[in-house]
Image (tube, coloured by chain):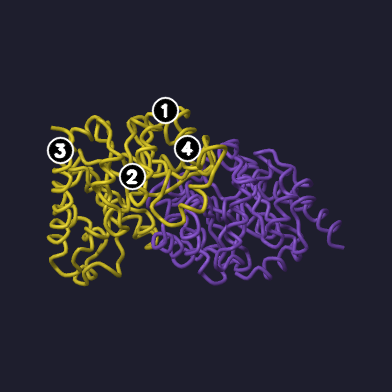
Chain colours: A purple, B yellow
Amino acid sequence: MDIALLVDEIKRKKSFLCIGLDVDLKKIPSHLLNKEDPIFEFNKAIIDATHHLCVAYKPNTAFYEAYGTDGWASLKKTIDYINANHPKIFTIADAKRGDIGNTSTMYAKAFFDDLNFDSVTVAPYMGKDSVEPFLAFKNKHTILLALTSNTGAFDFQTQEVENTFLYKRVLEVSKTWENSENLMYVIGATKADFLSEIRTIVPDNFFLVPGVGAQGGDLKAVCDFGMNSKIGLLINSSRGIIYASSSEDFAQAAASSAHQLQQQMATILAEKFI
Amino acid sequence: MDIALLVDEIKRKKSFLCIGLDVDLKKIPSHLLNKEDPIFEFNKAIIDATHHLCVAYKPNTAFYEAYGTDGWASLKKTIDYINANHPKIFTIADAKRGDIGNTSTMYAKAFFDDLNFDSVTVAPYMGKDSVEPFLAFKNKHTILLALTSNTGAFDFQTQEVENTFLYKRVLEVSKTWENSENLMYVIGATKADFLSEIRTIVPDNFFLVPGVGAQGGDLKAVCDFGMNSKIGLLINSSRGIIYASSSEDFAQAAASSAHQLQQQMATILAEKFI
């Protein structure tokens, strides 16, 4: 999917919300558990109820792999359902992959060709030749971990590296890679203070921002420091939306929770892009 | 699996060889392609021909995910086949996962519970709370990327970080994590020069060493600088063994290639552990 289409959709829907589809069978409403594919049924209901309020869906692969082959089949059904019914919605495989060259190519094939996601999250530790195989796919996007929202981010990412910090070096070095225009970055909302400096390093790329909601980030601050002239932000919320209710009204509750965030986003967009 | 059993098996088989099961349908003998599950048939033949020569098998998940749900099913059949027929062989899911706490727990469940691997490779970029959920599993092992064998290793891993290098900081910090006795490390054989210093930081842990063979590492040098009193090394070879021949004799050729490495290992073990 082309970035220009994503930006158009953000403007049309007045939303830059990404909904994380992290389905835990222990948390979904019990009446779904006797369905043939409870994970897919849950996702389908969430998608049907929220697709007009968000511009992206982000299944986290861990939650599917934990259920083995059946889980992988549920992931496939979920992405197929989104692509068939909402082709203008941007899809993210939150997979945090990365390996040596030919192996990264196989991961890229898994997520871009076989599953047909628009993007995949990738870890930077193994460097250029572990990321470029993903970047080589046309009209597909590689969302590189830069500064994550968890406390472990302070173990290595914020360490000083040759007069800068590791996460900044990741940003700077990755700009020099082939097809770097296909890069987006994961920047945790809990680190909003860091955002304006990050924007000066990568002014044009989209950021995927987790940590608004369950992890406590502040939407307004993230937008003030992280937006660029093409909006440039996808704000993810997972648990705060999909587990807004554990009763039979879960999809309605998810829509209501997504609507609240979308309304805040509409206000921010109106202020910044009159 | 307990490490003491792995060490016993190394001594009994006179081998510390790990065989990487990275099955690419474009590279396997064409007569297998009309079988119902060519990936599993290939692996089964390789395992039947080599199990007495190695102490570990390491399927790389990318090569299974690239074939979607069918590929994941082939992975499941492969690990089930190893566990059922060769329960003393150490199994490694080369998955290079890592995510925030509850998500890493789901990955750990996928590989340790659902698939029943003995170990999984994990990337360190997200820090302590992304790795400890794996370490919490008893008798399971987390193989942390430290210094990889690819050229991209020089992008970040060998960068100077507060009077040391990033990969050394990963080693040092990871030692302080809960259940760190369950850690092993990926140390690329192409970086044999670094091994003696690495051993002083983590004297007791096993290293998984890729890059002997196709990537050009030297077995003798790796053993001279990397072994400890409990051997402490698993040397991986993938393509050099499983693609030793692309004809109908592929399994025999794989065994012959594995046998060559095993013989070199037997000589080294005899020299060092008389």
Total numbered badges shown on the rendered structure: 4
Q: Contact (CB < 8 A) between labels 1 and 4?
A: no
Q: Nearer the viewer, residue B210 or B6?
A: B210
Q: Which mark is residue B179?
A: 1
Q: Which mark is residue B271?
A: 3
Q: Nearer the viewer, mark 4 or mark 3?
A: 3
What amino acid type is highlighted by mark number 1? Asn
Query: Residue A216: which quarter of the image?
Result: top right
- As displayed, is residue A69 above or below residue A4? above
Instruction: Calculate the distance from the C-alpha at mark 4 to the C-alpha at mark 3.
Output: 37 Å
Residue that badge 4 annotates: B131
Label 4 marks which chain's residue?
Answer: B
Instruction: Calculate the distance from the C-alpha at mark 3 to the C-alpha at mark 2.
Output: 38 Å
Q: Earlier in the sequence, mark 3 or mark 2?
A: 2
The residue carrying pointer 4 sits among few (fewer than 14), some (14 to 19) or many (20 or more) residues within 10 Å by Cα, namely many
Q: Secondary structure at mark 3?
A: helix
The residue carrying pointer 2 sits among few (fewer than 14), some (14 to 19) or many (20 or more) residues within 10 Å by Cα, namely many
Label 3 marks which chain's residue?
Answer: B
What amino acid type is highlighted by mark number 3? Glu
Q: Going 33% across and 49% down the picture, which residue do you hit?
A: B189
- As displayed, is residue B186 above or below residue A178? above
Q: Earlier in the sequence, mark 4 or mark 2?
A: 2
The residue carrying pointer 3 sits among few (fewer than 14), some (14 to 19) or many (20 or more) residues within 10 Å by Cα, namely few
Q: Going 76% across and 56% down the picture, which residue do you hit?
A: A227
Residue that badge 2 annotates: B115
Label 1 marks which chain's residue?
Answer: B
